Amino acid sequence: MGYCLAVIRVGAYIVVFVVFVAIGAFGHILFFMSPLWLSKWITYFTQWWARVTCMVLNIQIHIEGDLHAKPGSLIVANHVGSPDIFILGACFKGFFVSKAEIADWPLFNWLARLGMTIFADRSKRHQVKAIIKDIGERLNADHSVILFPEAQATDGTDVVPFKSAVFESAVLTKRPVLPVVIRYHDGHKPTIAHYGDSFIRHLFTLLKAPRLKATVMILPEISAELNRQALAEKSYRAIRVKVVDTSKTQIGY
């Protein structure tokens, strides 16, 4: 049954991919002369792509907290695996910050570029200022930016300390930081949403799963009236407390 479901989902997603690439390309052409409208349109495009992807994978999302983030918020979350992107994209309108490797992934890179993803190459420290500037410009334009400040995936039972550099964009623009916790409920430890040691195996496991339940906990926003290290630490502690506490028991709904 799992293999049949995986094949059906691959076929369905090929259709979704073709449709959204066509829609994305059309939007870029339509709003080519208006960066303001293009940016606004892209946030809707990304959200609908994420929601359709959640439908294909049967990812069921339970929300705790206020889903309506202030425009121009820096949304930070713990990172477990690829479903995090679909889930946060379905919940919030905004732009993603992604590791630079995704820009070279076949097919995935097309949608990422159409969604105006900000690619961060952690091996090139001289690019940090440019990334901070890019994030800041989008925050100042009242577009939220979504990122995973751990800069790596964990198994969902704990969180590693956050990289502080990206928080400089919130400090410079005086925009709030919105901490978000993602928790999965599939009865596996680690959760099947976790990347593990093989992305292909991780992807195939997701495709075979009948459904995946997740809770998105939206925590109180944090004012950017701190330096970047303090802001990163405060966000880290707020998220880690929830992750560690909820990992001790399986949350049902």
Image (tube, rainbow, N blue to C red):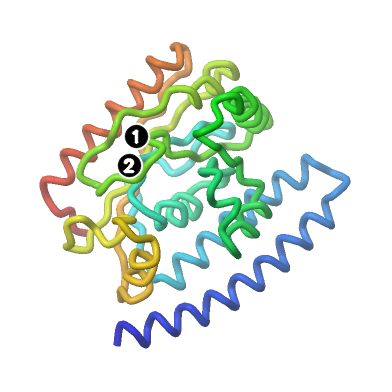
Which mark is in front, 1 or 2? Answer: 2
Q: Quadrant of the C terminus?
A: bottom left
Q: Which residue is mark 2?
A: 181
Q: How many marks?
A: 2
* Crowding at mark 1 (Cα within 10 Å: few <14, some 14-19, many 20+): some
Residue in the foreground of this view, choosing between 38 and 118: 118
Left or right, 233 with respect to 34, comes to left
The kind of residue on which mark 2 rests is Val
Instruction: Determine which quarter of the picture holds residue 164.
Output: top left
* 13 sits left or right of 221 in the view: right
Q: Position of residue 165 (x, y in %)?
A: 48, 23
**143 lies above or below 87:** above
Name which residue lies at 48% across and 78% down: 10
Quarter of the image with the N terminus is bottom left
Relative to 240, is 170 on the left or the right? Answer: right
Q: Is residue 34 above or below residue 185?
A: above
Residue at the limit of the structure toward the left, as seen here: 248
Q: Which residue is mark 1?
A: 219
**Residue at horizontal 23%, vertical 37%?**
242
Q: Where residue 206 sits: x, y (%)?
A: 35, 68
Quarter of the image holding residue 185? Answer: bottom left
**Residue that sits furthest to the right in the current view:** 33
Looking at the picture, how far across and down is residue 176, in whole percent? 49, 25
Q: Position of residue 210 (x, y in %)?
A: 31, 76
Secondary structure beneath disc 2? strand
Q: Nearest the camera: 251 or 18?
A: 18
Above or below 225: residue 5: below
The single residue placed furthest to the front in the displayed view is 123
Asked if the residue at tag 2 contacts the one at tag 1, i.e. Cβ–Cβ closer than 8 Å, the answer is yes
